[in-house]
Image (cartoon, rainbow, N blue to C red):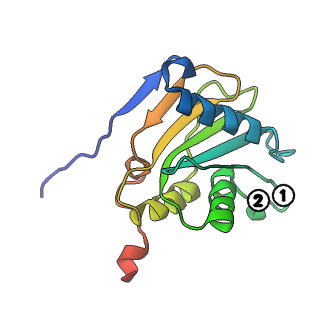
Amino acid sequence: MESQQYAFTYQAYKDKRSLSSADQHLINEAVMASQTAYAPYSKFKVGVSIRTVDQMITSGANQENGAFPIGQCAERVALYSMIQAHGRKQIDTIAIVVDNKNQKTPASPCGSCRQMLNEYRSYQPTPIRLLLSLATGGQVIEINDIKDLLPFAFDGLFLGQ
């Protein structure tokens, strides 16, 4: 037996002012998207903005439902909106913002969204960066590639796609 280890490096910034103006703008777009979230049950509003390599931005927000399994996470709403409106574009960066008074640190995507974003990533040659933040400001976490959050992911490539 051989033990192996998986680790990844990410960047933590005190606030978004340490980022490029383009990244600050993307986070601001995600904050605006979070204002359209429908989260009457969890009060956990999430806004997402996706920037493609050709600088197009598409946003989305989580949409809850009383029948909890049929709600949609903001990441999926934004990705599906982008694909519907513009086709399968190569993604550069995704900003994910949480608006919840009890949340003290940025939150990363749930397992289902990690899986979905990782599969989308498997069909493009470049990383998909993530910027995680709170709508109220403060710390920003930069993750270099969505693949870092889901090692050994299952995707369509296993099915010969």
Vertical position of residue 35 compared to residue 20: above or below: below
Q: Position of residue 135 (x, y in %)?
A: 70, 29
Residue at (69, 60) in percent of width and height:
81
Tell me the CA gap for discs 1 and 2: 5 Å
Q: Position of residue 26 (x, y in %)?
A: 61, 36
- Judged from the image, the secondary structure of the residue bearing numbered disc 2 is loop
Q: Label 2 near label 1: C-beta < 8 Å?
A: yes
Q: State left or right for residue 125 relative to residue 137.
A: left
Q: What residue is disc 2 on?
A: 71
Instruction: Let me know if residue 66 appears in the view.
Output: yes
Quarter containing the N terminus: bottom left
User: What's under tag 1, amino acid-wise?
Assistant: Asn
Compare marks 1 and 2 and give the one earlier in the sequence: 1
Residue at (72, 27) in percent of width and height:
102
Residue at (28, 46) in percent of width and height:
6
Q: State left or right for residue 147 relative to residue 35.
A: left
Tell me the crowding category of disc 2: few under 14, some 14 to 19, or many 20 or more residues within 10 angstroms, Cα based: some
Instruction: Let me know if residue 44 appears in the view.
Output: no
Q: State left or right for residue 8 relative to residue 25.
A: left
Is residue 32 or residue 72 the one in the foreground?
A: 32
Q: State left or right for residue 43 relative to residue 86.
A: right
Residue at (33, 35) in percent of width and height:
9
Tell me the crowding category of disc 1: few under 14, some 14 to 19, or many 20 or more residues within 10 angstroms, Cα based: few
Is residue 67 or residue 134 the one in the foreground?
A: 134
Q: What residue is disc 1 on?
A: 65
